[in-house]
Image (tube, rainbow, N blue to C red):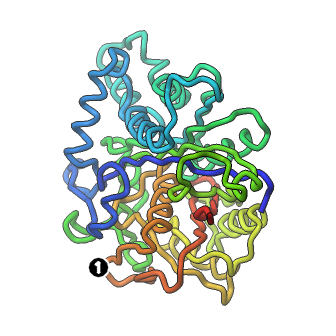
Amino acid sequence: MPDDLIIIRGSGSISALGAGASGYANAAPAFSSQPLGSSTLSVGALPASVEAELAALRKEHSAYRQLDRTVLLALLAARQATAQAGWKSDNQENALAVSIGSSRGATGRLEQFYEEFLEEGSVPPATSPLTTLGNVASWVAFDAGTTAGAALSHSSTCSSAFQALGNAMAWLRAGMADRFLAGGTEAPLTAFTLAQMHALGIYSPFEASDSPCRPGAGRPSTFVLGEGAAVFALEKISRKQLEEGNYTSASLSNTYILEAVGFGFEAIGSKTGLSPEGHHFQKAMRQALQQAPCAPSDIDAIVLHSPGTHAGDASERRAIAAVFGEEMPALTSNKWLIGHTLGASAALSLHYALHILATQSWPAPGFATDLTPAPFRPVRRILINAAGFGGNAASAIVSAVQI
């Protein structure tokens, strides 16, 4: 283990299950239906309780009324993480930086402004600043009250959140920041984005009330689009500080170590950038294991990327078999509960991993699948996979602090 440890002091999440991790205990998929032309698609939309929080957030500040839904989700998740970490927004003693990933960015506002342009031939002056990818991290930094750190936005399709977390880890280890808010956010449930996903031929044919997203279930593909965000409060401490117990007077019982974020890329000339063997997954997992460092046998569970697409699910399984061989960990996923949230999915999978470490359990899906129904050994270290169009993959490793 490196001398400098990156710890997760706090976390926050927004998804179809609601705010925080409590929804995982109910073991019930949280899907609804949304029309698209003559079709009706299952989606992982936010519940009424979170919609109420978003409505209240818009009223807090005049500028917030114009922000895209993607940005607002990130603000809510970042506030949860900051509160759990015990950070105060008015404390500038330690430089706080922000690193947020999103695949589509402010897609809702962008589509709205473009429709207005087609109709009227003009757009409001705020169109450009409100639709840049950079405005996601900038507004999170604004809301957190920081003036001393950087605000970084990342986009690398569905591995965007791990790009953001990997960059945050590098900055912390280099001493370029003292604290980081890092994660991912996505609000893609617009007609145009749903049409794009539907055109790929992978969208689930099942009704929202009938477990529409089924990772590891084989054919047909059962991709379901969802929305959400997850943000983590990261700090660097030394192993000596942790061992001596003088890092902080606060309890470390709910603190986790982000041990590694590995990356993999394969140049495949297809619409998804995916090989049957999942070479990009293999590279990402091996890099994460080396970076931690740990052996395959040290991984107790894997939170799969597994979006319910037949080719993607099979590719990831082959990659895992190539890396782990007979040391196969338990396999689990949260997408059958909340759908695939694109650039936020890796962060929400990491948040799900923290829930597993805390509770030593996970819900079992009510359909035939290769997912492990329950942990078959104590879960101390989890690897989380993510991958996206263009051949990008990323893997993170997280463990609980052993006091």
Which structural element holds mark 1?
A: loop
* Residue at screen point 24% across, 39% down: 51
* Residue at screen point 73% across, 51% down: 241
Q: Does residue 86 appear left or right of residue 26 in this picture?
A: right
* Residue at screen point 50% across, 47% down: 10
Q: What number of labels is visible?
A: 1
Quadrant (top left, top right, bottom left, bottom right) of the N terminus: bottom right
**Above or below — where is 113 with respect to 221?**
above
The amino acid type found where label 1 is placed reads Gly
Q: Does residue 280 appear left or right of residue 41 in this picture?
A: right
Of 174 and 391, which appears nearest the observer? 174
Quadrant (top left, top right, bottom left, bottom right) of the C terminus: bottom right
Image coords of residue 211 (percent x, y):
27, 70
Image coords of residue 245 (percent x, y):
67, 54
Q: Which residue is label 1 attached to?
A: 366
Give residue 17's quadrant in the image: bottom left
* Residue at screen point 50% across, 67% down: 357
Residue 391 in view, yes or no: no
**Above or below — where is 249 with respect to 44?**
above
**Above or below — where is 95 with respect to 51?**
above
Of 154 and 288, which appears nearest the observer? 288
Image coords of residue 358 (percent x, y):
46, 65
Give residue 274's quadrant in the image: bottom right
Residue 50 in view, yes or no: yes
Image coords of residue 67 (percent x, y):
38, 25
